[in-house]
Amino acid sequence: TNTSLTAVLGDVVITQENITEADPGVFTSNGHGFETGDELTYTSNGTNLKIKISATESVDVEDGAKLFVIKIDNNTFNIASSYNNARNNVGLEVTNAGNNSQTFKTGKIKSVTVNDGGSGWKEHPTKPYLANEVQLHFTGGGGFGAQGHADLSEVANSNPPEYIITSVNITNGGSGYT
């Protein structure tokens, strides 16, 4: 039988109550899954988040702005204006927490749920509920003969167990693949 899995992207909606206006601003999103340096794309969906750019001036964070994560812990993070600033722990001061519908999109896969691992998946010798390699199922656009797999790793100390995709390998793009 075929393997079936569901991927959840690491995009988050962060409400005003979960943003501390400070220097640097603190964003709270339980289990956010971000790492320092991850790029986020901001969409306001209302009143824009404001950041301080000088002693006397704050500006709106525009829709589509690229921000970078400074991970504090699994539930909180700061934002930086560049990858290098994130790596050097130089966060942005937040002077207005925006609104309750703003999104921070990463495109990074946050979690994968295996709905059906295919024949024999429950007999995997080390993880009876999940193999460490999952065949990908291509629907639409994969072409005849498309093949690939995703390698999964267990997240340390997760209960219940959680897994992340560590790599995706497309071994054959199928007919029409260039």
Image: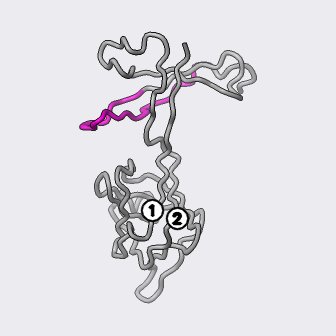
Mark count:
2
At a point 53% along the width and 47% down the height, the residue shown is: 107
Amino acid carrying mark 2 in the image: Gln
| Earlier sequence position, callout 2 versus callout 1 | 1
At a point 51% along the width and 29% down the height, the residue shown is: 5
Image spot of residue 155 (x, y percent): 31, 36
Tell me the residue that label 2 is attached to: 102
Q: Name the residue at the right extreme.
A: 176
- Tag on residue 148? none
Q: Is residue 23 above or below residue 67?
A: below
Q: Is residue 52 above or below residue 62?
A: below
Q: CA distance from mark 2 to mark 1?
A: 6 Å
Q: Residues within 10 Å of mark 2 (few under 14, many from 20)?
A: many
- Tag on residue 14? 1
Element under label 1?
loop
Element under label 2?
loop
**174 vs 126, nearest the viewer:** 126
Quarter of the image with the C terminus is top right
Q: Does 157 lie within the magenta span?
A: yes
Q: Residues within 10 Å of mark 1 (few under 14, many from 20)?
A: some
Amino acid carrying mark 1 in the image: Ile
User: Is there CB contact under 8 Å for labels 2 and 1?
Assistant: yes
Q: Look at the magenta stretch and give its main secondary structure.
A: strand
Q: Which residues are magenta?
A: 152-171
Q: Does 67 lie within the magenta span?
A: no
Image spot of residue 34 (x, y percent): 39, 50
At a point 42% along the width and 32% down the height, the residue shown is: 166
**107 vs 55, nearest the viewer:** 107
Image spot of residue 93 (x, y percent): 39, 75
At a point 55% along the width and 75% down the height, the residue shown is: 47
Q: Name the residue at the left extreme.
A: 157
Q: Is residue 28 above or below residue 112?
A: below
